[in-house]
Amino acid sequence: MSNEYQSHGIKMSSASSLKGSIATHPENSSSFPHRIRDVFPPGLDSSCSTRGARGHYTLAPGQLHRTLTSCYGPEKHVDSIVVKSAWYGRQSKLAKQEFIVLRVEDLEIDGLTNYLVLDRTTSTPSSVFSGLIPHSRLRFQGEMARDAFKIAYDGNVGQLLQECNLSPHKYLERLDFKPEESLLLYQLSTLVYIISERYPQFRVADINGSGFAGLAWECMREIRPSASHTHLDQGAKKRGKLGWIHPAPDSVEVTEICQLFHKEALAVTMELSKQKSIWATVSS
């Protein structure tokens, strides 16, 4: 793994912590007992008493990445949690906040699906887990901003968007990823973390979050060119537009970030492979 990646704070755990990494609670009745609960929370269980009453989880890009890759265990299903589809959304209110909605599935568990929102905001996260975000980012006007994955507690995407103050809204574009060239969630978290660290401060394009969301979107298209791309509601004309400002990600910028992504994603994949071998050894 590159020194640059380690300097960003994403490190893989040693073999001694492997078995303790599996998020299971056998004492609780669960439809899906073995899963990563930060991505697939208890609210997804039909027997959950707090279903519909709890708010979303909020994780910074680096935190989601560590959750997925910090230590390997066969029941974590890290290499089977995929992003099936993504939507580029735009809030219909005056702020015109732009964001990405993700539909994720664990291919090892039939029927296990959830929704995440990815955006850059200046608001204080409403989730009880919002304190997990390690640091805030200064906006050029002195306001605080955060990049975050906001994870539905019970799989209700409509409620998630309401909690994130993103309703009413319109979807401008959609991506559907091919099974033969899937986008793993840990790969996406790698990409987003790179973008977040590369641009830690608000830029003019981030007034409504379009600079961050638009760059992440174009990089997703670049690293998975086989994905089906659909324009919705004249998305190409509306995305990023706010009054006289209509920024668009620079192609050179997208290429540079994707090159860094491929380098770091390979390092993570190699480390996970190493941890799989270690797990197989200690489990035999």
Image: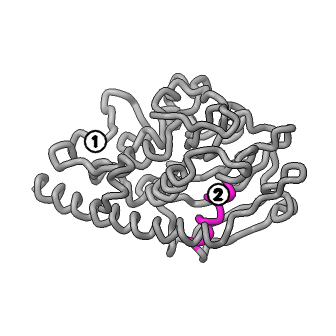
Query: Looking at numbered disc 2 in the image, what kind of residue is underneath it?
Result: Ala
Q: Secondary structure at mark 2?
A: strand
Above or below: residue 21 compared with residue 171: above
Q: Mark 1: few, some, or many residues within 10 Å (few <14, many ≥20)? A: some
Q: Is residue 81 visible?
A: no
User: Magenta part of the protein: which range?
Assistant: 213-224
> Which image quadrant is residue 64 in?
top left
Q: In terms of depth relative to the viewer, which is nearer, 58 or 202?
A: 202
Query: Looking at numbered disc 1 in the image, what kind of residue is underneath it?
Result: Ser
Q: In terms of depth relative to the viewer, which is nearer, 219 or 36?
A: 219
> Which image quadrant is residue 148 in?
top right
Q: Is residue 60 left or right of residue 274?
A: right
Q: CA distance from mark 1 to mark 2?
A: 28 Å
- The residue located at (81%, 65%) in the rendering is 236
Look at the image and say whether residue 157 sits in the magenta stretch. Answer: no
User: Which quarter of the image is occupied by the N terminus?
Assistant: bottom left
Look at the image and say whether residue 217 sits in the magenta stretch. Answer: yes
The residue carrying mark 1 is 21
Q: Is residue 256 visible?
A: yes
Q: Is residue 88 left or right of residue 219?
A: right
Instruction: Tell me the tag on residue 86.
Output: 2
Above or below: residue 59 compared with residue 72: above
Q: Main secondary structure of the magenta part?
A: helix
Position in image of residue 35 (x %, y %): 39, 44
- The residue located at (61%, 47%) in the rendering is 118
Q: In terms of depth relative to the viewer, which is nearer, 234 or 42?
A: 234
User: Which quarter of the image is occupied by the C terminus?
Assistant: bottom left
Q: Secondary structure at mark 1?
A: helix
Above or below: residue 267 compared with residue 100: below
| First along the sequence among labels 1 and 2 | 1
Q: In terms of depth relative to the viewer, which is nearer, 231 or 254?
A: 254
